[in-house]
Image: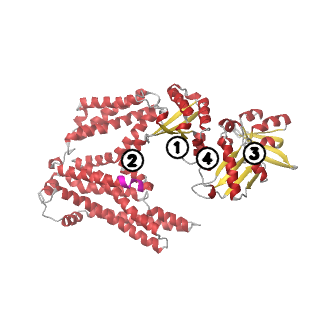
Amino acid sequence: MTSKISFSKLQKENLRHRIGTILIALFYFLLMILTLVIRIQGMMAEEGWRLSDMRDMLMFFAKPNPLMLPASIFLGVFMAISGFAYLHSRTKVDFYHSMAVKRQQYFDVIAASSLLIFAAAQILITAVSLIIINVMGFGTAAMTRSFLFSILYYCLIFAMSFLTAALAMIMTGTMVVGVLGTIVFLIYPIVIRWMPSMLGSMFFRTYADAPSMLNKLDYFSVLTVAVKGSMAGKYMVSLLIGTVLLSVLCRWLFVKRPSEAAGQSMAFPKVNGVIRVLLVVPAAMYAGGYFFNITIEASLMWMLFGVVAGTIEFHGVVEAIFQADIRALWSKKKQMAATMVAVLGIVGCFYFDIFGYESYVPKTEDLAYVKVVNDGMLQRKWIFWGEDSKGARAEEAGKTMELLREVAKSQRKMETENTPDAAYITYYLKNGAVKKRNYILTGEQYDAIVEELMQSKGYKEALYSLYTADWSKINNIRWETIGRQERMNLTEEEKQQFLTIYLSELDALTYEEMKTVMPTAELIVSHGSESQPDDYYFIYPSFTKTLAFLESQGKESRTVSQLDITKIEVIKYDEYANDTKYRVTDPAVIAKVKDHLWSNEFTYGPEAAGFRMNVVADAEVTVYYLENGKRKTLSVTPDEAGLSMLDIK
């Protein structure tokens, strides 16, 4: 039927009937303004607050933030449910469909009115906030731009939430089912996003992270996008595309929706089978995962029980909702059986590793880079904050890849008790794909892999920032050895010379030396940037050119073994506070043990340098030594051999 009523008149009439919605939007406006005022007042009430803190807080409020994003989703869902609620009343449907208004036009009116209400509230919030901020003297062009960008982002979040709920309301015939459908549509992308991860973490020893392809599902979830509000710019395009596609789909279904669907559970019964399968399969998977996890992944039978029970239960519940009849719980048994077979098939594929996930290692010709990281390497990465590169280049990683292939073959056969190390592997392929694995390693496997990596220039560049940092921005280099820490007063030319010498010897540093030789000194490099904090480098006895340069600067490095130690004091602690304290003064024992002591004056312990030190006791060790006729003390940490020599159990 052709409309004889203008769009503006329809919109005014629609707004007149949505006073409750407008009042909720006004409450939202007042709540956000009060939140801003309270936060300003709260910060000003704090003792010692600074202007920079206030600016940071106001900029946080100006950007998409956790306060407004959930409210945008809630308002979108609420306005869609209230706007399309009439579809679930036969009397109201008959009334509206008898009007001389095209269905698509009435859809446009509801959608436009809802967006208008929300946008008006958002503009009011922004205007009042900017007035308050400018009166306080904190207004800037950057803050204004952030507020304007946030308006657009909140409106897109609102539109996605509104259309998601509208889709559920249009496809259903009762309010209860419509609300349930809205919840399902909102969380479904998240459920699908994490289902492979759940199964992978349960059945694969080498599981490390979700495939990068699954990360793209984040773009389809308005809840995920809202949570990641700090990355708003990244999701703007996906929100815009999603809004357009959902609006087209909702508008088309709104026109096609039969009038007699009001009061029925579903408005489009022909798609019930597809919807049922899409709901039951992940629900049964998670039911199986729940039972498997409560047995601490010890019994596959409970996983199967959960899958079977979950399929029967969820299939029956969904069908009962579809038919609005409790007796439908046991209907469509063939479809139930087919769904159960599908779910068991998916579980079987993961359990038996049908697709070879565990044994996968890319061919060398397909590889661009390989990155190997373990807990120790992660710790050292914080120390050196090396550039987050892709690790060793393929041409450098031939032997490493051979070792990784052997590791991959042994994963399911390996006993956990004999595997002290784990390594996180990232394969970067030439086609752009990224594959991640988490290998459990024996000590021998771990040592062999890291030894090969330490010969890779790419690996060292990824670990040590000095390879990639801008040396001209280094504003301070401190040298530290036992009993001394001094700033190195170097000219720009001397700094370039010193760092070049150090890196040339770092190039030759082997893993064997890292794990068996204690460093003699430490460098603390300051880069003059909050994003690039201090990093720490160790100097080994084999770094003869580096040590010679330091000596030319009057800085002679030394280790604990070079000290004139007169005695060693040991305090052993136990959980019952029965501490044991004794001293070692035998020169023969001191001469042997001094090579196994690490100075605690260094910023980081020996493990950070790669040194293999297995401390097995809770003890405090202090050495007393003479220097220039003066008695001095030094806190130290013994390695495993040192613990035995000092009789520390």
Q: Which mark is residue 390?
A: 1
Q: Secondary structure at mark 3?
A: strand
Q: CA distance from mark 2 to mark 1?
A: 24 Å
Q: Secondary structure at mark 4?
A: loop
Whether the residues at callouts 3 and 2 have beta carbons within 8 Å, the answer is no
Q: CA distance from mark 4 to mark 1?
A: 13 Å
> What type is the residue that disc 3 sits on?
Ser
Identity of the residue drawn at 41% across and 44% down:
215
Q: CA distance from mark 4 to mark 3?
A: 28 Å
Mark 3 = which residue? 635
Seen as rendered, the residue at the extreme bottom is 135
Mark 2 = which residue? 218
Q: Residues within 10 Å of mark 4 (few under 14, many from 20)?
A: many
Q: Quadrant of the N terminus?
A: bottom left
Q: Give the mark nearest the N terminus, 3 or 1.
A: 1
Q: Give the mark nearest the N terminus, 4 or 1.
A: 1
What is the magenta segment's predominant secondary structure? helix
Span of residues in magenta: 233-238
> What type is the residue that disc 1 sits on?
Lys
Where residue 134 sits: x, y (%)? 46, 73
Q: CA distance from mark 3 to mark 2?
A: 51 Å
Seen as rendered, the residue at the extreme right is 629
- Between 633 and 289, the one nearer to me in the picture: 633
234 falls in the magenta region = yes
Does residue 34 lie above or below 369 as drawn? Answer: below
Q: Give the mark nearest the N terminus, 4 or 3.
A: 4
Q: Residues within 10 Å of mark 2 (few under 14, many from 20)?
A: some
Whether the residues at callouts 3 and 1 have beta carbons within 8 Å, the answer is no
Nearer to us of marks 3 and 1 is: 1
Q: Secondary structure at mark 2?
A: helix
Nearer to us of marks 3 and 2 is: 2
Identity of the residue drawn at 26% across and 61% down:
112
